[in-house]
Amino acid sequence: MIKVSRGCLGDEELLALRSVFEGGYFGAGREVATFEEQLRSYLSVEHVVTTTNGTAALHLALDALGIGAGDEVIVPSLTYAASFQAIECSGATPVACDVCPNTLLLDISDVERRITAKTRAVMPVLYAGQPCDMDLLQGLASRYGLRIIEDAAHAFGSTYRGRKVGSFGDITCFSFDSIKNITCGEGGAIICRNGSFANLLRQKRSLGIRRGSDAALKTRGWDFDIDTRGFRYHMGNINAAIGSVQLKRVEEFIERRRTIARRYDAALHRLPAVQPLCIDYVVTAPHIYVIRVKDGRRDELMKFLDRHGIETGINYAPNHLHSYFKRENLILPEAEKAYQEILTLPLHCDLSDSDVEEVINCVRNYFQTRDMKP
């Protein structure tokens, strides 16, 4: 089976883990501090706060901003449930907005239509690794006094106007789970520009414990105070050690992902019933590769590929269609239409050129076989 996604780990990651094992401490320590410094350098930012995962990063950012009960956060419906659940965990209400059909990024005009007196923030999702039109979104946020919390789980390594995602804007949250552009096994990070806010994030990720500095990463120390709500959201040394090795290979990973995505684009755009997303791979570090399959053929194509040993996915069901998040009379036509058409093809760095050609040929064969039927 050609997998739709997978993490790419090797001997160097194992050696890094062995070093952690020999050190005997697996919580938040030296390796976490090192990984955060490496992320600061790679992204050209001042403040990086790592977390247990990307969902924790989103929740922690919302909590530190004081967003909670009675507040609303606008978020595209076509995203993983983590975006919505993080908002729910803060006590705020996720307000689903529609997406643009060619990119599946949030529709900024629809965002503006959904702003109310209760709106505190917008959470753009960088779907498939694509940067949003941050100039337009920041202008909107400025007019209405809103915060922007980027859900950049898909977008580590992407750029916008020559700068890496995370190096500009308000607050950016990354995921380093097992299948992302780089992995820590499991992990996340918050990028922000304000030092006081970063210190609050560090305090809150460690149960609200205040030790005066980021000493939680240096020594345990038993003299501390707690003066805010906190969570157990800190990254551990094992995860950070994996991330440090992965970060050394990030440009190699990104280039391989781009090569595969471009090959898919070149081969599949000629098929009348297949529409690749409009993505600029000069700036996008792709996490997933998604096509839209027209004429009601998506599910049949998915089954055909599975029978031929090719795993695919659907990223994602719009959240406003899930029972927990349903709102009466809410219709988001582009997100709902996309859900009937989107199909995720295999994209990861362990795919060989022959694997990629097999996927392409199988998609072509499906349409040729189907169109030849009487």
Image (spheres, helix red, strand yellow):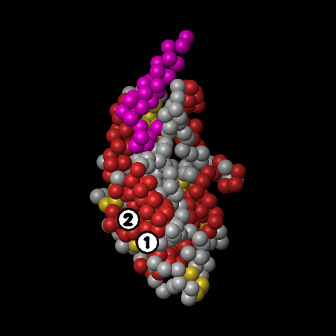
Residue 212 on image: x %, y %: 48, 86
| Kind of residue indicated by mark 2 | Leu
- Residue 241 sits above or below residue 180 on the image: below
Q: Which residue is located at x 61 percent, y 51 percent? A: 319
Q: Does residue 143 appear left or right of residue 266 in this picture?
A: right
Residue 298 on image: x %, y %: 55, 31
Q: Which residue is located at x 46 percent, y 78 percent? A: 218
Name the one closer to the observer, 270 or 364. 364
| Residue 30 tag number | 1
Q: Dot 1: within a 10 Å radius of its alpha carbon, few (fewer than 14), some, or many (20 or more) residues?
A: some
Q: Which residue is mark 2?
A: 39
Quadrant holding the C terminus: top right
| Residue 67 tag number | none
Name the one closer to the observer, 187 or 138. 187
Residue 223 on image: x %, y %: 56, 88
For residue 355: magenta? yes
SS state under label 2: helix
Q: CA distance from mark 2 to mark 1?
A: 14 Å
Q: Dot 2: within a 10 Å radius of its alpha carbon, few (fewer than 14), some, or many (20 or more) residues?
A: many
Q: Which residue is located at x 42 percent, y 77 percent? A: 194
Residue farthest left in this picture? 162
| Kind of residue indicated by mark 1 | Arg
Residue farthest front in this picture? 22
What stretch of residues is rendered in magenta? 345-374
Q: Let me know if residue 169 appears in the view.
A: no
SS state under label 1: helix
Residue 33 on image: x %, y %: 42, 71
For residue 152: magenta? no
Q: Main secondary structure of the magenta part?
A: helix
Q: Let me know if residue 303 appears in the view.
A: yes
Q: Which residue is located at x 56 percent, y 29 percent? A: 306
